[in-house]
Image: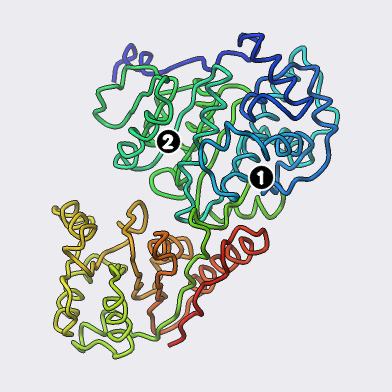
Amino acid sequence: MGKARACGLLVLGGAVPAASSSQGAVSGASDSLGSGRGASITDALVFESSDLNRMSEARASHGVAAFGAASGAVASVAAEAAADAPLQRWGLSPAQRAATVAALAFMLERQALALSSGAAPVLSAPSPAFLAARDRASRDFLLWAVTGAGKTEMIFPLIEAALRRGGRALVATPRRDVVLELDPRIRKAFPEARVTTLYGGSPQRWERGQITLATTHQLLRFAGAFELVIVDELDAFPYHGDPMLHAAADRVCTPGGTRILLSATPPPSLQREVRKGRLAHARVPVRYHRHPLPEPAVLAVPAVRALCKERRLPRRLTTALRESLERGAQIFVFVQRIRDVGPLVALLRAAGLQAAMAGTSSKDEARTETVQAFRQRAVRLLVTTTILERGVTVPRSDVFILDADGPLFDASSLVQMAGRAGRAADDPHGRVYFCSPARSRAQHAAIRQIREMNKLAKRRGYLIADDAPQRRKK
């Protein structure tokens, strides 16, 4: 790549400063913050500097689901959000709404910090977590949302807030198919905004949009261009474990910008930051349908290699599979290794299960067609690898994870695979089985994480009914 081309790819500059917004918007927002009426919560992100100290003095707690950003500004914004019609238009559940309010308030405090470096006064009493974030030059806010929580719906108000300030927003996600799926939803939600979609070979790669949707590697094209950067599935390849992409995701933010990190299974390093109070965050412990997450049952099943060698499946496994088929479920059967897919499909067919079966992996040239057949119920049982642990939602699904104690399945993988079950509102209690000859630490950690989220959802009153079936012990 030549120097001229490289310079052309680098986009410098970003959001229009809040001061350049219309005075009407600024005045309306400040009146709203002072009175608790009028403008929307997103209007609150454009305000007069004279209101900063007054906002920081409001200390009443309103139960915002934030562990790092619950400062006076959060409380002030949360109070207004309780009756905010513009926020309501997004149709968020109580858990989604609380987390979104916390993220919006963090964006507000980021703006306040940016203003305080200029002529604006400093917040009189910012939150301890925000002070820590400032000291670490952190712009990160973690949205820790369970699988199926509806993360896309939660980012809409955040994007709206950035646009209202005259800024630009970037949504980065690991996979091209997710970018293409998100594109029409964003365009429908923001019909007046210029939307640019970037991936390898994208026809819009030279365009500049108010909202940019991109695969993770496209972050390398920008510097200081976006007031809001949303990194989806931060624990997934290629973003996870790539320092270059981490640096790029930080570099694309404007001064005072915010980086929202989305994950159902944050990396251990971020979880430690959360426990130590060093990372502003909010948890969404329940799915959009407000039912508990299915808790995995543990089946004592020999390793896949042993099953294929003996050419026989244990009765407890075939019984559970038949029960799932009889209830009309689609069945994911996850294995660790690609080489196990074909032999296991043959063994399942020989077991006499009355269902159409198939197998797929990253080496399957017809993977798209196979998955589509599974979605359409032409295939009822699909043996696969972790290639389908994310991004595939199939209504009325049950999950069987074989070799669940294996070294390639860590706690995050187990939680993600388990997250394929129970996603539909008409079948929220899908079944999940960890099948292995022994229990691993990863299994214990995954089950513990799922239970903790269910307990948190119940404690906060997010569940519409505590009607989850008892865990099945085999």
Q: Is residue 152 above or below residue 9?
A: below
Q: How is the image coloured?
A: rainbow
The part of the image, by quadrant, that contains residue 346 is bottom left
Q: Label 1 sits on what residue type?
A: Leu
Image location of residue 191, percent across then percent down: 39, 23
Image coordinates of residue 200 in percent, x first then y, are: 27, 31
Image quarter hosting the C terminus: bottom left
Classify 404 as above or below 177. below
Comparing 193 with 253, the one in front is 193
Q: Which residue is depicted at the point 64% across and 34% down?
A: 84
Mark 2, other Cα within 10 Å: few <14 / some 14–19 / many ≥20? many
Tally of marks? 2
Residue 79, horizontal then vertical, whole percent: 73, 38
Looking at the image, which is closer to me, 88 or 18? 88
Say above or below: 350 vs 277.
Answer: below
Q: Is 125 displayed left or right of 300 in the figure?
A: right
- Between the residue at mark 1 and the residue at mark 2, the CA separation in whole angstroms equals 20 Å
Q: Residue at x 74, y 16 (%)?
A: 48
Q: Residues within 10 Å of mark 1 (few under 14, many from 20)?
A: many
Callout 1 secondary element: loop
Q: Nearer the viewer, residue 146 or 338?
A: 146
Question: What's the mark number on residue 225?
Answer: none
Identify the disc placed on residue 279. 1
Residue type, label 2: Ala
Q: Is residue 281 left or right of residue 62?
A: left
Q: Is 277 on the left-hand or right-hand side of 384? A: right
Whether pointer 1 and pointer 2 mark residues with C-beta atoms closer than 8 Å, the reply is no
Residue at numbered disc 2 = 172
Query: Who comes first in sequence, dot 1 or dot 2?
Result: 2
Label 2 sits on a secondary structure element that is strand
Question: Where residue 125 appears, x then y in whole percent?
Answer: 84, 33
